[in-house]
Image (cartoon, helix red, strand yellow):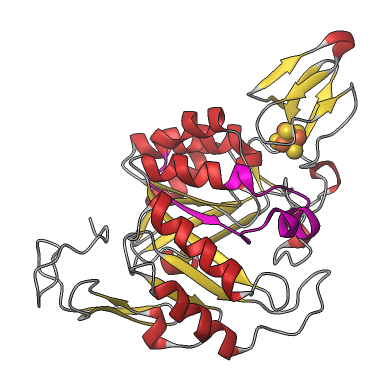
Amino acid sequence: MHEALFYTKLENQTVRCELCPWYCILKPGQTGNCKVRSNENGKLITHVFNRVAAFGVDPIEKKPLYHFYPGKSILSVGEVGCNLHCSFCQNHHISQCFATEFSGFHEISSKEIVDKALKTPQNIGIAYTYNEPFIFYEFMFETAQQAREKGLKNVVVSNGYINPEPLKHLIPFIDAFNIDLKAFTNDFYLKQTKGKLAPVLETLKIIAKSEAHLEITNLIIPGLNDIESEFENMVQWIAEELGKDVPLHISRYFPKYKLEIPATPTETMLSLYETAKKHLHHVYVGNMSDTKRSSTFCKHCGEILIRRNAYEIQIQNIRENGNCADCGTPVKIIFY
Ligand code: SF4
């Protein structure tokens, strides 16, 4: 067991965790809302240090990141637990269980993960993903520091539910984020995730102002977050607060976990894609086969730059200096 960062000791051995907006107040023996941080005799400890629950080598496009080392692979690691409780969670078998009740951990150090990443062919670095990485903050932070020292890239795929101080402390070691913006109403967040919208928007603003690369994912769920006007408010906010160049992935929902609503109709996806394109330069559809709407086009002249078919990509019409071969407009994609 490893002592956690970002907490305050209160009276009678009680502690307050300050990592995420829950600010859990825990008496000795109690575990936080994320199910991985506990008060052990007046000390906040994390149960997910030096262990992982899930490993994989994925295409970077699977995170999804489309403007960050396209075509490369990334060693991906995850733990158990989450600080949101989405009714439609895709990974609920690991995200919604207590660390103390999970039996499938691999014991592994940060150094061993970095060594593994260095030995994996075509691999650019390490992605912290599968469950919510901010709740295994201490292990991610240590691994990211060591990975950076070895020239590896660090990628965080997250729900964005973290407090500003720990986020700012971590950002200098992270090269790219994909943040899930699940909807644009607090009502949706409260009912479907048990969290709140405002902290996620704050996270997005902090990342957008940093040096790290940012992409956003929005899962479209029929009847819950597919109202055209609400969706348009969201994309307008992204354009105004984060920038029109931030790539947005709108992802097709399929029934999972507690939610039995039928899958998102493709017409809804196509309609919202057109709405998003009015405000943002790079919009992609996910969880459905659509080469055109998964490909990257020059924001100025419309020339195709990267053609995608599932996780296969073809880079086209991009000069060595990274500009569009047709009109010379700089393409904001990180290749090297
Ligand atoms: S990280 Fe976990 S323990 Fe800490 S405030 Fe968030 S939910 Fe609570």
Camera-side residue of 322 and 110: 322
In the rendered image, residue 196 lying in the magenta stretch gets the answer yes
Would residue 88 be found to the left or right of residue 161 on screen? Answer: right
Would residue 208 be found to the left or right of residue 37 on screen? Answer: left
Question: Which of the 4 image quarters holds residue 150?
Answer: top left
In the rendered image, residue 269 lying in the magenta stretch gets the answer no
The residue shown at (48%, 28%) is 169
The residue shown at (52%, 78%) is 272
Camera-side residue of 234 and 302: 234
Can residue 1 be seen? Answer: no
Q: Position of residue 99 (x, y in %)?
A: 79, 43
The residue shown at (9%, 69%) is 328
Q: Quadrant of the C terminus?
A: bottom left
The residue shown at (48%, 60%) is 216
Q: Position of residue 229 (x, y in %)?
A: 58, 71
Which span of residues is magenta-colored? Answer: 174-200
